[in-house]
Structure formats: C-alpha cells, structure tokens
Image: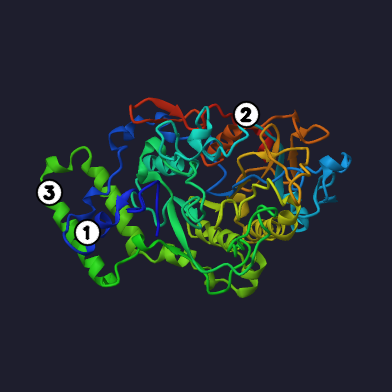
Amino acid sequence: MLHIGGSRKKLCNGVTRRDLLHIGGIGALGLSGFNSPRSLLADNVSNNGMSGSTGRAKSCIFVFLFGSPPQHETFDPKPQAAREIQGEMKAIDTSLPGLQICEGLPQIARIADRLTVVRSMTHEYPIHCCAYVMTGMPTYSIPLETSPRDPQHWPFMGSVVDYLDGRRTAETSPALPRNIGLPWRFCSKGTSSNQAGPYAAFLGNGYDPFWTDFSGEGTSIVPKLNADSQTELVRDPHAGIDLAARLQMSEGCQLPSDLSSGRFDARVHLLKQFDASRPLFERFAESANYDSHQQRACSLIGSSRMREALDVGHEPLALRQRYGMSLFGQSCLAARRLVEAGARFVSVFWDPFGPHGASVWDTHSNHFPRLKQYLLPVFDQSYSALITDLDDRGLLDETLVLCTSEHGRTPQIDSGPKGGARHHWSRAYSSVFAGGGMARGRVVGQTDSIGGDVADCPVSPKDMQATTYHLLGYDVSTTIPDQQGRPHPIAGTGQIRPELLG
C-alpha cells in the first residue's frame, strides 16, 4: 500500500482510499474532496517562486543513504592517519587527478571526473536528523526524529518544488507527479519507528511524495547489524532481488479490479459535465483548487505513463544488471526512467528493512563486514551506473543528482563491538553531487588530518538546498507560507554556493 504519515488509510495526497475511489463507485462528486489545506494561501508565495536565472536543471534525483555512510570509507579517506583512524580499507586514485576515495568504490572512482565531491558538509546535530537535512527548518531535536507530523517541521525539498511549480504554471495536471518517492514510504518496512523527513509539513499532505511500493523478496542475507547479539537472518532486497521483483504504483492509486479504464473515463466525463453545470458561486475561491486536485488524481489513476516509467522490465537485461539486481539499483534505474518521462523531483531512499537498522548505514557495530560485503559494493555499482547512464543519454547536464545523508561517522574507530564501529558525527562528512549545473570533476572543501572537523569551505545542508533550488530555477529568497500565513524561506538560512556550480 502507498502510505503517508501515520494513518494507513491515507493514500497519495492525504485523501482516503474511499475518497479517491468514489469516482469508481458511489457518486460523481467523489473526487471533489481531493483538496489541499494550502488553497487559501496559494497567492502568498513571494516572487511567485521565479528565479533571476533560468535554472540549469529540468529535474532532480535525490538519493538519500539513511543511517549515514562513513566519510573515511567513502569520499574522504585518510591514508596517512593512524590505523585507528584510517581503518581496514585503503585509498585509491580516481579519474580526477589528485582525488583519492575509498578502495570500496572502484566504479565510482572511474567516473569521479563527472562529480562534485563535497568533503566539508557540516551541521550541529549528530542524530538521525533526516528532516533537518531535507528541509529548511532552523533547529532540531531528538523527539522530532520520530514525529513526522509535528507542527515544527518544514516541507521536504520535493514538496516545495511540487508546490512552487504548481503556482508558476497553468499545468494543473502534469503527466507525472512532480514529487515521487521510491521504493516505498520512508522507513515503512522496518521495525524501527517512523522517521520524519520527506513530508510536506505545513504545505499540507497534498504535497507529500507519491510513494511507490515494492513487490518481491530479498535474495541475499546481509551481514548482521550487530554481530554480537543479532539472531535474525535478514534477506534484504536492497542487497539482491530476482528478475520478477518490481516497483509499482500503490494499490490505492490503481483502478479497482471491477472498474475498466473505459468505465473510469466515462465517469470522469460525467464528473466534468456535472462540474460544468455548477452555479458560478460554487466555483468561486476554493473550487478551482478542488478542480486541480481532481485532475491530478484522475491523471494518475487513468494514465499508464507512471506505470510504464516504473516498469524497469522494459529495459535490456544487460542494463538492469549494470545497475545491479538489487532494490537500490533497480530504484535508481526507475528514477532515471521517471525523469526521462518528465518527472520533476524523484527521491530514492535506502532505508531500513526488517529488524531495526538491518539495511541501513548506521554501523554502530560490524562496521567493516557490512561495508565490504554489502553496503559499498551495492552503492558503488548502482550509483556509478546511474550517473553513467544519464550521461550516455545526454540527460546528466539537465538532471541534478544529489547523494547525501543525515551526518557522517566518528574519526576514531570503536574496536569494542565485533567488526568495529564508527558512531554518529556531524561536524564533518561527505556528499556527492552531479549534473544539472553542478561542476564536473571538482572537490569542494577539506577536513583536518583525521576527518573530524572541516578545515576549509564548510557547506551546510541548507546550502545544498539553496543551491538545488537555484539550479531548478527558483530564487533562494522565495518564501512559502505556513498555516498561519507567515512566510518562510524555502531553504531556511541556506545560501547558494558558487563553489559547487559548473
């Protein structure tokens, strides 16, 4: 099922399944309740969301590695540091002269000349502050981690793009949803509690991502999160799936089994006739917003374009294998297909599956086995394939690809847990960006000799957001209204970073 927030009865943009499917059953008014609470504030967006520049990126793929990869074993190795800092893995040269990355990423090393590697990401919250990293909210706290609908939250980047795009274009029913989340609702397949982050907050549930769902089983048992105490064996689909597994639209966003597409189209036509006969006063004010959301719902249910884009089975087997027969790899391939089909903002979340943290990068134990046998090989293959495929198709220059997480990991290795450990660390970590106006072949910032503190050019998650909005064509000073009509800058305190731009 496709879910948002807390209620499992809610679908798509916060509407219930019964509301969404009224058009297929009990009345011609079924979708008139498919509305957003932002309707009364729609005209309060400063600058109309328009940028002084045209923007380089037509679309954005946001790759989020939940749990936080270690900077030392990814993009900021310290080969000259002591063993307890450097760890078990060595540094290797890349296609970008002077840049070394971890030996666990050999395929990414070969495409480094197409990337912007940021080694100086930093903020003050060494907790799973996904929402802080994904939104413009100014502060964070541990209780907010598991309270995705707390009123203190700000909107996710994809939700902001969806909202602003809807206000600067007359296109009320885009061919694809503007804000799509893969492979399922964030943190919905593990035993951990819901995590805050990719939700629309005060913009209203109507701007939450359109979540897809996954059908299939994992084929690979992944190294344990805790080698000292974990007894469960987890077949994590992020590590391996078979050819029959697939990404799909949620059940709630598909036609009922007893309703043909022809009958659905007839009922949409009937609804339009009914709307045309409404008295003028019923169309005043919020009724226009009802119409736009009706069109979005009907477009999604009645069109095959979303289903076609998600069906990676249309791709040659060799290409699917190049991305890797894992859920992460096939999600990256689906993201490429979605932006190629016209999607605006597509997110690929690599988050927990099964017992708490079983598929996540949160290596408080068994650090090196998990990295060597599972996390790094999957990431290396899938991410490098995504960038190469986009570039080969001429799409990389117009597709911004962000790959980040909520923080980094401690410089000092904890040798106590079996397999070693690195713990939460937000004072310095790495992210990697590509395409859509980002520089090709650039390293931004540096850390000290142990990778613990930023030594040059600190970049905050808010700066990442501001630069993203700029490349997507929005002025960083654009504001959006909360439920009381108060304006909030889309990237909080973030500033455009020219060091990142090509």
Q: Which residue is mark 3?
A: 278
Residue 124 is tagged as 2
Compare residues 183 and 39 and report the one nearer the observer.
183
**Res. 261 visible in picture:** yes
Mark 1 and mark 2 in contact? Answer it, CB < 8 Å.
Answer: no
| Amino acid, disc 2 | Glu
Q: Quadrant of residue 230?
A: bottom right
Compare residues 165 and 200 and report the one nearer the observer.
200
- The disc, 1 or 3, on the residue closer to the chain's N-terminal end is 1
Q: Is residue 101 left or right of residue 494?
A: right
Residue at image position (42%, 44%) is 162
Residue at image position (33%, 58%) is 299
Compare residues 201 and 317 and report the one nearer the observer.
201
Residue 386: image location, x then y, percent:
63, 58
Measure the C-alpha gap from mark 1 to mark 3: 19 Å
Q: Which residue is mark 1?
A: 22
Mark 1 or 2, closer to the camera: 2
